[in-house]
Image (cartoon, rainbow, N blue to C red):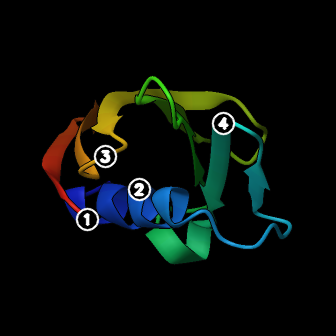
Amino acid sequence: MTAAILALALGRLLAQPVPQSTVDVGATLVCVTLTAAEIHARGRHLFLCGNLVTGELLGGLLRRSGREDCPISGAVDPASLCYVVSGCGTAGQGCL
């Protein structure tokens, strides 16, 4: 997994897209998934959830079986959309 993949997931998460099969939107919690094809991860997929009030980010890279390969965590500032995130041997920070 690369910092670009983390940025892609965060971009989708913070855009609060129209709900579809890969996105769940609540009052303060948004979750998004990226498929194995999107992240080129040999059958694994990524999920990331963010609390739009506290800025907490949690997720993971999952195997086809649903078992977590590695966790992802971080924080985002909902006002500026700047983030710090790490997981699976990768760390990234930036602003969307």
Q: Give the alpha-carbon distance from disc 3 to disc 2, as whole Å.
A: 14 Å
Q: Mark 2 = which residue?
A: 10
Tally of numbered discs: 4
Q: Amino acid at mark 1?
A: Leu
Q: Mark 1 = which residue?
A: 96
| Residue positioned 22% across, 35% down in the render | 89
17 with respect to 6 (left or right): right
Labelled pair 4, 1 in contact (Cβ < 8 Å): no
Q: Earlier in the sequence, mark 2 or mark 4?
A: 2
Mark closer to the observer (2, 4): 4
Question: Is residue 85 visible to the viewer in this orientation of the structure?
Answer: yes
Mark closer to the observer (2, 1): 1
At label 3, counting other C-alpha atoms closer than 10 Å, the crowd grade (few under 14, some 14-19, many 20 or more) is: few
| Residue 92 image point, x, y percent | 16, 46
Q: Where is 68 relative to 92, above or below?
A: above
Q: Give the alpha-carbon distance from disc 2 to disc 4, as whole Å.
A: 13 Å
| Residue 61 image point, x, y percent | 52, 41
| Residue positioned 66% across, 46% down in the render | 31
Q: Amino acid at mark 4?
A: Leu
Q: Mark 3 = which residue?
A: 79
At label 1, counting other C-alpha atoms closer than 10 Å, the crowd grade (few under 14, some 14-19, many 20 or more) is: few
Q: Give the alpha-carbon distance from disc 4 to disc 1, as whole Å.
A: 18 Å
Q: Amino acid at mark 2?
A: Leu
Labelled pair 2, 4 in contact (Cβ < 8 Å): no
